[in-house]
Image (tube, rainbow, N blue to C red):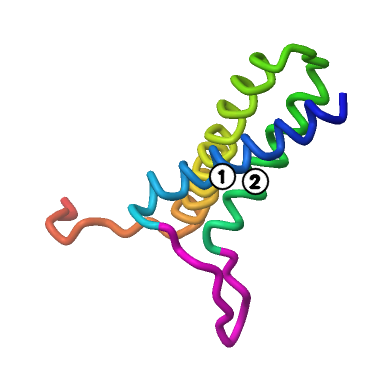
Amino acid sequence: MYENIVFATLFGGLAGVIGHVKSKGKMIMPRKTKKFIYLGFFEDFLTGAMSAALLVLSSGINSVLNVLFISIVAGLGGEALIRKLELIQWQEQQDSLPEKKPDNCKKE
C-alpha cells in the first residue's frame, strides 16, 4: 500500500509539472518577492502529488497500472480544479461590482 502512495505521489507531481508547463508555456522557478513567496512549478507539483495520493488512498487501488493511470489523471485534474475555483472567484467579484449602464442608453 505504501508503495502505491509513493508511486502515486511521484507520478501525480510529475503530471502537475507537465500541466504547469502546458498552461504557462515554460517552467517558472520559485522566487521570493517583497510580499510573498511564489512557488512556481513546485506549487503544481504539490497540487498534483496531493490530489493523486488522496485519490489512490480513497479508492483503494492495488494494481500498479491503475495507480499510474489514476495518478496522471489526478495530477492534471488538480490544475483544472484550481483554474475552475479561480474562475468562480472572478465571477463572484464581477457580480459584486455595481452595473454600469452603457452611454448610448437614452431615457424616454
Label 2 belongs to which residue? 47
Residue occupying image coordinates x 58% and y 80%: 32
Residue occupying image coordinates x 37% and y 56%: 26
Q: Nearer the viewer, residue 82 or 53?
A: 53
Label 1 belongs to which residue? 82
Contact between marks 2 and 1 (CB within 8 A): the answer is yes
- Left/right placement of residue 48 relative to residue 41 reads right
Which one is closest to the eye, mark 2 or mark 1? 2
- Left/right placement of residue 105 relative to residue 2 reads left
For marks 2 and 1, give the CA distance: 9 Å
Q: Residue furthest bottom?
A: 34
- Identify the secondary structure beneath mark 2: helix
Q: How many marks?
A: 2
- Left/right placement of residue 21 relative to residue 35 reads left
Residue 88, image x and y in percent?
52, 44
Magenta stretch bounds:
27-39
Amino acid type at circle 1 is Ile
Residue 92, image x and y in percent?
52, 49
Residue 85, image x and y in percent?
56, 44
Q: Is residue 66 above or below residue 39?
A: above
